[in-house]
Amino acid sequence: MKIAYAQMKIAAGHPDVNTKKILQLIDKAQKGKADVVIFPEMAVAGLMIGNTWQQESFIEDCWEYGEDIILASKKNLTVVFGNIELSDDSGFNAIFSARNKRLTCTPVDAGLSRYADDSDNYFSFIIKGKRYNVGCIFNNENFHFKGKMDFCINFYSEPFSIDRDFFFNSPGCPTIRIGLTGIQNTGKTIHSFNGGSAVFNSRGEVVQLTEPFEECLNFVELEEIDKMPALELPEVSETEKIYRAISFGVKEFLEQIGIKKVVIGVSGGIDSAVAAALYTQAVGAENVILVNMPSVFNSATTKGLSEQLAKNLGCKYYVVPIQESVDWTVKQLEERGIEVSNFVKENIQARDRSARILAAIAASVGGVFTCNANKAETTVGYATLYGDEAGFLSALADLWKYQVYDLARYMNEKIYKFEAIPQGIIDIVPSAELSTAQNVDEGKGDPLKYPYHDYLLRAFAEDNLTPEDILGWYVSSQVEDNIGCENGLVEKYFPTAQDFIADLERWWKQFMGMGVAKRIQSPPILAVTDEPYGVEQESQNCLHFTRAYLELKERLLAN
Amino acid sequence: MKIAYAQMKIAAGHPDVNTKKILQLIDKAQKGKADVVIFPEMAVAGLMIGNTWQQESFIEDCWEYGEDIILASKKNLTVVFGNIELSDDSGFNAIFSARNKRLTCTPVDAGLSRYADDSDNYFSFIIKGKRYNVGCIFNNENFHFKGKMDFCINFYSEPFSIDRDFFFNSPGCPTIRIGLTGIQNTGKTIHSFNGGSAVFNSRGEVVQLTEPFEECLNFVELEEIDKMPALELPEVSETEKIYRAISFGVKEFLEQIGIKKVVIGVSGGIDSAVAAALYTQAVGAENVILVNMPSVFNSATTKGLSEQLAKNLGCKYYVVPIQESVDWTVKQLEERGIEVSNFVKENIQARDRSARILAAIAASVGGVFTCNANKAETTVGYATLYGDEAGFLSALADLWKYQVYDLARYMNEKIYKFEAIPQGIIDIVPSAELSTAQNVDEGKGDPLKYPYHDYLLRAFAEDNLTPEDILGWYVSSQVEDNIGCENGLVEKYFPTAQDFIADLERWWKQFMGMGVAKRIQSPPILAVTDEPYGVEQESQNCLHFTRAYLELKERLLAN
């Protein structure tokens, strides 16, 4: 028996688009003489359809498109696909099997519920006069089938994450893992899907593997699976995975919203340079506009690096100074008796760049502008709302600063194969250049010391740790080991317990306070980990220290 | 037996603050000779604590504060309160009962699970030598107790909503309903809690009622409840409810984030005028700064109305023109060969006002600026990101335009008792005044015809209806009846089916497209209905029409 499986790109919320593609693939599978063709979970509606689940007419629409697929099944070709099952005017996620224009799946008459008891999760096919029991497994969930299965289908719908290892719990029979590609989103979070489809033999070894992020229709003879040689899984570095996922994600997202032109503010710093290099690869230099927007605080160094970057990438490049506008804003306020502090002047610069210049250029060219904030900045709100926190997408906001640097080096070495991102940008101290206190030529920059704060903030953001945990480790000199940063940094950055505590409280306050407030209004974030912002609901409840923390701190400072 | 119940304000995520208040109220209850004092569900941690649930140290912190409350219970005073129950290092929502410094609740040893079987939802107290069986009911959920209850506690934790009727399903015994006040949020949505605590007799009649949105500690003798006279529920209009909830909500939210000064851009239109009147009432005229920011498109009419509004409210008033800055931005772009269309110029104005002027003034005075978008605008994204869509809070974004007008008239009549919001602002055509096409003096304004679109968009946003439903009603001349707008409007606004369809598709496209995209980056929204934006997850999946809609449209246009 010949099985075809379609690792296809699914457009969430577009049953018309998906069904058209499925019908084409059914034809292709038949031409390839398949007996069964398998499509992903929720292939008709898409997985992340948000509150569209509540639109009865949408649910019925998906069901009706599903009927087209059923009618396209052949006398000699069983079609297995995921779609919404109707139930009392609402819907649920189900798997369907059809042959000869009729639904054939058992035991559930009209569809196999995604959430049925595990023991119900099997189909029974009759193909060429032989009955096959086909178990269904969802993602890496548990299964326990009542009888022996002839083969299994593993519907694999996990979005891409660098945190997820390749995992397969073999049911002891040949198994087709069917994944999907494309991007889907929950509003604030954009997930990419890298496919991950594969064929496993009865011993759980991989014998056929698909290219990540690519669509394909593969074939395999069921009877051959246990005779095929086991494949080695390709070794892929974390940075390469990140590069693939992000360049795929931005390209797909732009396609989805129907936009070609991308405007990027480039400061001469690492984040905007990596964004520029990424988007240039994804949509082509002819579609990327780089804009440098200096004020009096921007050094000749970073202005030169920006220009060099634009030259290297071959993008259109504008220099649009903001000083006159910033001065004018300050003048308008001061004339009315409103005092404008230096700190306020910093944020005026940031907003002037994004909301005045970049947004206007993007709108004028029918494009979008990007938000280049990394995960450390996003965690503590070290960015200005309507300023550098603005944009159509935050493509780097699930990457810690060290991962942004890794990506820069990776792209220079493997993608551009020359110093497209000038080494000067990689070497310069990270700085917002919004005041004389952030003068890069004097080695001054951001208050975030990334080699330490990347890891401290990761402990807050991804591991749900709090100052109580961190200070506990400080007492036993285990901070670096536990958060994963280089040894010696705590002593280097914080000579006294007081220094350590002041820093800890500063960033915890930002994380619980302005960090949350700004993330509520931030652009969508492209996810590459299991813990991107936007997935977990964050309440804006401001600063709290546990009593155990306060007691520990008091004891520590009393010594 | 004397029962005290504390309708208290709960600070989500702040067990220290809540516990301090609970301990004070326990003392007060004892002084009042209560035998039992009842606190709300999750009184220690707060209900909406988002992903803080995943911080082990926070969960343990709440548990330890709960121990303080247990230790504060007296020999003659049972304390019933909601808190997080520990379970394998995670937590769940539970009710606790303590007496004489020890937990006393049964049948669950250490807490009564919020999610236990209904039949388990009772305590057993021994007070003055007598055993009382006390049933627990959560919100308006079903209950079925195994035996007869001596009285019930109804933990009522629903946030305020104008859609929710007063409802009580009597268990046939005296019942204390205990609610909470304050605000809690899920990030994008700010919910207010109006309390709603009450005492019901065995027949289900109200015999004691608390003031909405106010904290109080009330007492009642259990044996008296069935002898007390039944109370009439006060009649409160929808607009009065909305006014109370919003003025409470903005005041509480400002308090929570520790901000006093509020900056409001006033255009001479209704939304900003209502915002100005609301905030002035909530935080005092001395804390409100109104800013009019005219361009060449702003009429003398609206400039005059803005000034009059500021005079009436007694707020500080600035006029900060934006034309020079807008011209400068256009010049900077055009000098670089970038063509700037009139539409782009409109959005440049909107961003210049919020991101350049309002944000700078707010930061300079240590305050915030408001977003005044209503629900119709929010639904279709008829507002500019980083422009009029920006701000610290959208206090009006759960109100349709007609509700904003109702609120204006209500405040003039009942709160200010004079035309604080000038009648001219109520009478003028709604207009963004961003181009000559929106000249108010010529009666031109917004593309939204609110008497119709308010209701069409409500059908999309609150009732999950789609063009398929609306066009079906159009065919049978039932649109107005079904969406609830005035009769005759469809014919008035749309002479032909083509006109009707073009309008329907225009706003559906906006609702599914830019509406979603902008809401992802919008400020938090103060909820007054069951269907505010931010509660349901919205995926950005762009435009889709069902096949049934497209077929219906084709048939209709063929005729």
Image: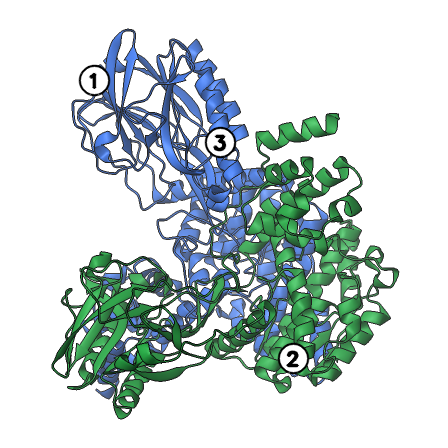
Chain colours: A green, B blue
In the image, taking residue B99 as reference, residue B222 lies left or right, namely left
> Disc 1 marks which residue?
B226
> Disc 2 marks which residue?
A414
Asked if one can make out residue A87 in the rendered structure from this viewpoint, the answer is yes
Report in which chain the residue with disc 1 lies: B
- First of labels 1, 3 by sequence position: 3
In the image, taking residue A475 as reference, residue B15 lies left or right, namely left
The quadrant of the picture occupied by the C terminus of chain A is top right
**Picture residue at 54% right of the left edge, 49% below the top:** A463
Front-lying residue, B475 or A326: A326
Nearest to the eye among marks 1 and 2: give it.
2
Which residue is the extreme one toward the top? B129
Q: Residues within 10 Å of mark 2 (few under 14, many from 20)?
A: few
Residue A48 is situated, as x and y percent measured from the top left of the image, at: 38, 65
Please name the amino acid that badge 1 sits on.
Answer: Asp
Report in which chain the residue with disc 2 lies: A
Against B84, is A189 above or below?
A: below
What whole-number distance in Å separates the C-alpha atoms at marks 1 and 3? 37 Å
> Disc 3 marks which residue?
B62
User: Residue B489's image quarter?
Assistant: bottom left
What whole-number distance in Å separates the C-alpha atoms at marks 3 and 2? 51 Å
Report in which chain the residue with disc 3 lies: B
Residue B540 is situated, as x and y percent measured from the top left of the image, at: 44, 67
Q: Say if labels 1 and 2 share a chain.
A: no
What whole-number distance in Å separates the C-alpha atoms at marks 1 and 2? 81 Å
Number of marks drawn: 3
